[in-house]
């Protein structure tokens, strides 16, 4: 299984065996973190692996997912750092899934103050992983996702590759399965928006940006697999335009 296939078959795993993962696999995962592409190159980040196998080091609160391993990302704060962290973590999540291990993002709990203070930058999010007895994969049709018509507007007829890229993006995991992404799709560009949540605006804003970054990883992995050339930018014209229910995030230009 490669990362593209993992997009379509992955599901969150919340029950793990309390068992070591082979050192070679852990090494592969750590090596992969060193080679990961960023969404924004100038933002410095650090990954930190936490093992709860020998002793409990972190993530033991009531809202945590109980797992043998967690990988945390800490990041320099700056424009787009949450998008970037989500983007990097989801690539890692797909990679770990492709190695036959279960994964679950952990947004509701954190490693604790002691561990956080050992991180180079500001802690953002973690991914729990390990061996599981549960079925690791499912058919993508079983994933609970909003209907396409709720999140995508096709302004023009697009080819099968673009449709598959959108499907891959929609299958991304998100905090509380919120799926805050909205797509406006043309033949040669996809504008990406996030749903505004007026009541919980500040908190949701943070979570939404991590989710959008996670979704961007699916979108970019799918584009690469299908040999579709894309680039990412922010259009000033849309950035400054007020939209009632949505906030503009970025534009993917195709070709
Ligand atoms: C940023 C982020 C944070 C998440 N936080 C948690 C969490 O704290 N606890 C949990 O059980 N699941 C968490 N999840 C997993 C989502 O609940 C899950 O992805 C979503 O319900 C869709 O299910 P699926 O991943 O099986 O398709 C999180 C996912 C993301 C992307």
Image: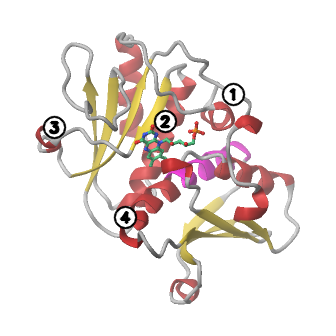
Viewer-side residue, 238 vs 175? 175
Residue 151: give x, y in percent of width and height.
Answer: 70, 63
Residue that carries the numbered disc 2 in the rendered image: 93
Q: Position of residue 239 (x, y in %)?
A: 52, 83
In this figure, which residue is indicated by the disc labeled 1?
A: 138
46 in relation to 248, above or below: above
Point out the frontmost of discs 1 and 4. 4
Query: Is residue 255 shown to the viewer in this render?
Result: no
Q: Measuring 64% from the left and 25% from the top, which residue is drawn there? A: 137
Quadrant of residue 237 within the rendered picture: bottom right
Closer to viewer: mark 4 or mark 3: 4
Q: Do residues under tags 2 and 3 come within 8 Å of each other at their CB atoms?
A: no
Q: Is residue 153 above or below residue 30?
A: below
The label number, if any, that marks residue 203 in the structure image = 4
The residues tagged by marks 2 and 4 sit, at their Cα atoms, a distance apart of 24 Å
What residue is disc 3 on? 115
Q: Nearer the viewer, mark 2 or mark 3?
A: 3
Highlighted range, magenta: 214-226
Near mark 4 (Cα within 10 A), the count class, few <14, some 14-19 or many ≥20, is: few
Which quadrant is home to the C terminus? bottom right
Q: Secondary structure at mark 3?
A: helix
Few, some or many C-alpha atoms within 10 Å of disc 2 (few <14, some 14-19, many ≥20)? many
Would you call the spot at circle 1 few (<14 residues within 10 Å), some (14-19), or many (20 or more)? few
Q: Is residue 225 magenta?
A: yes
Residue 119 image offset from top left, x and y in percent = 17, 43
Q: First in sequence: mark 1 or mark 4?
A: 1
Q: Earlier in the sequence, mark 2 or mark 4?
A: 2
Question: How many residues crowd around disc 3 within 10 Å: few (fewer than 14), some, or many (20 or more)?
Answer: some
């Amino acid at each position: 299984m490669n990362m593209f296939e993992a997009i379509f078959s992955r599901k969150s795993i919340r029950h793990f065996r309390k068992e070591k993962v082979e050192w070679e696999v852990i090494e592969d995962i750590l090596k992969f973190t060193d080679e990961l592409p960023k969404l924004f190159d100038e933002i410095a980040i650090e990954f930190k692996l936490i093992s709860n196998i020998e002793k409990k080091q972190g993530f033991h609160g009531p809202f945590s997912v109980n797992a043998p391993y967690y990988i945390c990302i800490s990041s320099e704060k700056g424009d787009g750092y949450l998008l970037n962290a989500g983007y990097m973590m989801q690539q890692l999540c797909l990679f770990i899934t492709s190695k036959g291990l279960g994964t679950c993002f952990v947004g509701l709990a954190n490693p604790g103050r002691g561990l956080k203070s050992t991180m180079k930058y500001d802690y953002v999010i973690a991914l729990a992983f390990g061996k599981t007895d549960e079925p690791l994969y499912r058919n993508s049709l079983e994933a609970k996702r909003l209907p396409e018509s709720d999140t995508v507007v096709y302004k023009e007829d697009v080819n099968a590759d673009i449709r598959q890229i959108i499907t891959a993006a929609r299958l991304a995991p998100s905090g509380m399965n919120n799926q805050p992404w909205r797509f406006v799709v043309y033949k040669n560009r996809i504008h990406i928006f996030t749903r505004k949540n007026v009541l919980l605006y500040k908190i949701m804003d943070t979570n939404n940006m991590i989710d959008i970054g996670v979704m961007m990883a699916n979108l970019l992995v799918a584009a690469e697999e299908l040999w579709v050339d894309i680039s990412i930018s922010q259009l000033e014209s849309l950035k400054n335009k007020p939209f009632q229910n949505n906030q503009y995030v970025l534009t993917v230009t195709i070709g």
